[in-house]
Amino acid sequence: MKASIIVTSYNYGAYIERCLRSCLSQNFPQNQYEVIVVDDASTDDTLAQLKKFESHSNFRYIVNEENVGVAESANRGIRASRGQYFVRVDADDYINADLLLFLTRYLAENHDAFCVSCDYILVDEFGNKLERRYAKDHPVSCGIMYRTDLIANFGLYNGNFRHREEEELRARLADYYKIHHLQIPLYRYRMHKSNKTKNLDEMDRFQTLVEEVKKSGSA
């Protein structure tokens, strides 16, 4: 199988249907990709929303018995995946129909790339366009396609990081993390009051931990 889309979700029942419709409507052979949702012990109607998609042969979901955070949830999805490549999508976001087509082709043609990111568009709660963002200047943790075997060899994400898990990975791998950037806005990043990145105290705490990883790597 060529690619896996891994969706992590915690209480995003209000948004996940739009997310999954975009993931399951890719301009890509259905038998060459899969969509895996890892629900992190949601207490809303997420499970009911997931059941709507059970008829899709390339769709499956995992339900965590307890909340473990986004990094460990992503790891569980990666371990369960069968794709040569994988890309993460947050359950409150959605993607362009050509995302898999462009990102898989890029990695196939650029063997020096550890991963490749695409640009993204900020949208509001209703999907209205707010702003285009360049991933090279404003990196986010999703919309990045990895070579599954390589990231697995490096131990995946640090499961202790509930925020800034992508930054920790970059800091830990340092120069080996060769990210390429495709300047096409294939990802839609939804801004709303429940974004986990709005927990500023937690974001600051994990930023301090990322800085410690950077220091230990340069020591």
Image: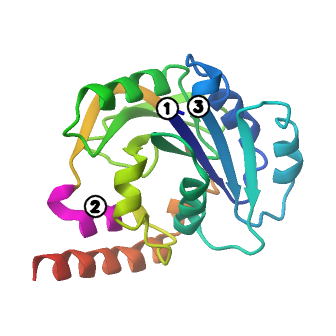
Residue ID for mark 1: 2
Q: Which residue is mark 2?
A: 170
- Pick whichever of labels 3 and 1 is earlier in the sequence: 1
Res 33 label: 3
Residue 198 placement, left or right of 217: right
Chain-order first, disc 3 or disc 2: 3
Q: What secondary structure prevails in the magenta region?
A: helix
Question: Is residue 64 left or right of 218 when viewed as pictured?
Answer: right
Measuring from the top left, give residue 14's x and y in whole percent: 78, 45
Q: Earlier in the sequence, mark 2 or mark 1?
A: 1
Camera-nearest label, 2 or 1: 1
Q: Quadrant of residue 156?
A: bottom left
Q: What amino acid does circle 2 point to?
A: Arg
Q: How far apart are the two marked residues, 3 and 2, measured between alpha carbons?
A: 26 Å
Which part of the image, by quadrant, shows the N terminus?
top right
Asked if the residues shown at circle 3 and circle 1 are in contact, with their CB atoms under 8 angstroms apart, the answer is yes
Q: Which residues are magenta?
A: 167-176
Asked whether residue 214 is drawn in magenta, I would say no
Secondary element type, mark 3: strand
Task: Give the image's coloring scheme.
Answer: rainbow
Q: Amino acid at mark 3?
A: Tyr
The image quarter containing residue 165 is bottom left
Q: Which corner quadrant of the image does residue 58 belong to?
A: top right
Image mark count: 3
Residue in the image at 52% along x and 65% along y: 71
Answer left or right for 153 relative to 161.
Answer: left
